[in-house]
Image: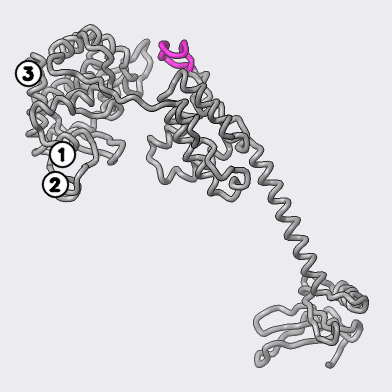
């Protein structure tokens, strides 16, 4: 092998001829030190020698990182290892293994420190990871379940004007590794005493969250094989949700309509009657905006939590109720401004007003969702097709023919829906004369 004295210029000028697969340049000063180049890559310092009668070659590094003197020193060190009976390749493998072990230990230490942190950090990561797969309502429910409480509220009947901590808030302050089965069972027993319904929802969300943690590399190391929230004690402590039966009977309609129509607040009165006649969910009716009313084609667009939105008929009496409401803001059932304050939202959920009116009518335990249940139950008297009722209420089709082959346009729904409304009003003894032409819309009422 031809050897030359390495200089900076010679090293920088060295390259591999295009007709060769590799080329070498050897240093005359240090035995075994060479420079290797390929047609496609930059040259690298190499060390070549013999160990136990066999040739070996090791790469030292590129000239950009190693000076000539550093490369010579490294080559001499490698030759001394061979002279001492050691294989430099074994030493290099051991060094790499030791480095990988140190990196793994450092990563484990970082992961352990993260797991020692509060559960809220992993809960936030869970919500962020799953948000794309959830609807807005489901995502908001998860946010609400961890709220700390202590915020002022206008609803003075609960918490004396201050919100209370939500069920999962207490668990969020614990390290993830401390969410053990006994801890969750004690939490379930405590929460079930005051708010079993919310606690059951929180428990279901917690189980799904812990299942997700097991699947994540950064959390799996601290999680047990069995989900700590999925225990019989926790399930028994929370109990089963009772089946709701509250609904208006046909003979209760006259008294209930009389009590509701005589309420002092016309907005709440119209809201409760609309809720019964449309069979919609309470939140769907409350979120109605004026642009959702299609006066020309007599349609009402409902923001459906399941399908996104659906259009149902705007029946004559419901149109009569809505047209009489003042337009304070974009919401049909808008809050009433007080003291000149600007209003931007709908009314608060009128549970208290419904209870008072229902008690006055002699109907006990009726809820807002019970009015939706009443719509479904009362339509049985008219033998309305089940698919029609489901489409108006926003229920998913329950049969193949209903799902894939039956298409009911708005005018066909209107035939059935107006019949339902007319029957409800007849049973309630309600007669009305529309005070506005069919195409009229409520006028804007300026804020004080």
Q: Residue at x 22, y 6 (%)?
A: 360
Q: Which residues are magenta?
A: 152-163
In the orientation shown, which residue stands out farthest toward the top? 360
Q: Is residue 317 above or below residue 400?
A: above
Labels in figure, total: 3
Report the front residue among 81 and 317: 81
Q: Disc 2 on helix, strand or loop?
A: loop
Report the front residue among 421 and 359: 359
Q: Residue at x 17, y 24 (%)?
A: 277
Question: How many C-alpha atoms fall within 10 Å of the one at disc 3: few (<14), some, or many (≥20)?
Answer: few
Residue position marked by numbered label 2 in the rendering: 406
Residue 344 sits in which quadrant?
Answer: top left
Residue position marked by numbered label 1 in the rendering: 387
Image quarter hosting the C terminus: top left
The answer to whether one can see residue 407 in this image is yes
- In the image, residue 404 lies at what x, y percent? 18, 50
The answer to whether 112 appears left or right of 213 in the picture is right
- Depth check, mark 1 against mark 3: the one in front is 1
Residue 69 sits in which quadrant?
Answer: bottom right
Residue position marked by numbered label 3 in the rendering: 426
């Amino acid at each position: 092998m031809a050897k030359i004295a390495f200089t900076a210029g010679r090293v920088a000028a060295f390259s591999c001829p295009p007709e060769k697969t590799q080329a070498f340049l050897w240093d005359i000063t240090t035995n075994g030190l060479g420079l290797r180049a390929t047609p496609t890559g930059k040259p690298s310092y190499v060390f070549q020698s013999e160990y136990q009668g066999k040739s070996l070659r090791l790469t030292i590094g590129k000239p950009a990182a190693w000076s000539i003197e550093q490369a010579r020193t490294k080559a001499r060190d490698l030759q001394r290892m061979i002279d001492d009976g050691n294989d430099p390749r074994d030493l290099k493998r051991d060094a790499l293994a030791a480095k990988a072990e140190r990196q793994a230990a450092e990563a484990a230490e970082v992961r352990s420190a993260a797991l020692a942190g509060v559960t809220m950090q992993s809960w936030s990561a869970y919500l962020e990871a799953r948000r794309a797969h959830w609807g807005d309502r489901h995502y908001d429910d998860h946010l609400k379940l961890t709220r700390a409480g202590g915020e002022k509220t206008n609803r003075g009947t609960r918490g004396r004007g201050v919100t209370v901590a939500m069920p999962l808030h207490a668990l969020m302050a614990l390290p993830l590794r401390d969410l053990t089965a006994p801890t969750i069972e004690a939490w379930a027993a405590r929460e079930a005493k005051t708010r079993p319904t919310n606690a059951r929802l929180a428990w279901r969300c917690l189980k799904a969250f812990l299942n997700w943690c097991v699947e994540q590399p950064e959390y799996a190391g601290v999680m047990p094989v069995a989900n700590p929230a999925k225990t019989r004690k926790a399930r028994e402590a929370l109990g089963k949700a009772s089946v709701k039966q509250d609904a208006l009977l046909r003979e209760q309609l006259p008294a209930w309509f009389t009590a509701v129509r005589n309420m002092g607040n016309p907005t709440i009165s119209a809201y409760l009657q609309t809720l019964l006649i449309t069979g919609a969910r309470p939140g769907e009716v409350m979120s109605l905006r004026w642009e959702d009313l299609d006066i020309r084609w007599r349609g009402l667009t409902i923001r459906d939590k399941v399908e996104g939105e659906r259009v149902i008929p705007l029946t004559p009496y419901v149109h009569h109720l809505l047209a009489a409401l003042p337009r304070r803001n974009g919401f049909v059932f808008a809050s009433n401004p007080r003291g000149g304050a600007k209003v931007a939202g709908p009314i608060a959920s009128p549970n208290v007003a419904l209870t008072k009116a229902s008690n006055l009518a002699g109907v006990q335990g009726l809820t807002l969702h019970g009015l939706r249940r009443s719509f479904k139950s009362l339509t049985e008297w008219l033998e309305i097709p089940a698919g029609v009722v489901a489409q108006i209420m926003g229920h998913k089709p329950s049969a193949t023919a209903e799902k894939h082959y039956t298409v009911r346009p708005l005018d066909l729904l209107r035939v059935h829906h107006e019949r339902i409304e007319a029957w409800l009003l007849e049973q309630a003894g309600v007669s009305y004369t529309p005070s506005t032409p069919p195409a009229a819309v409520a006028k804007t009422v300026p804020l004080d």
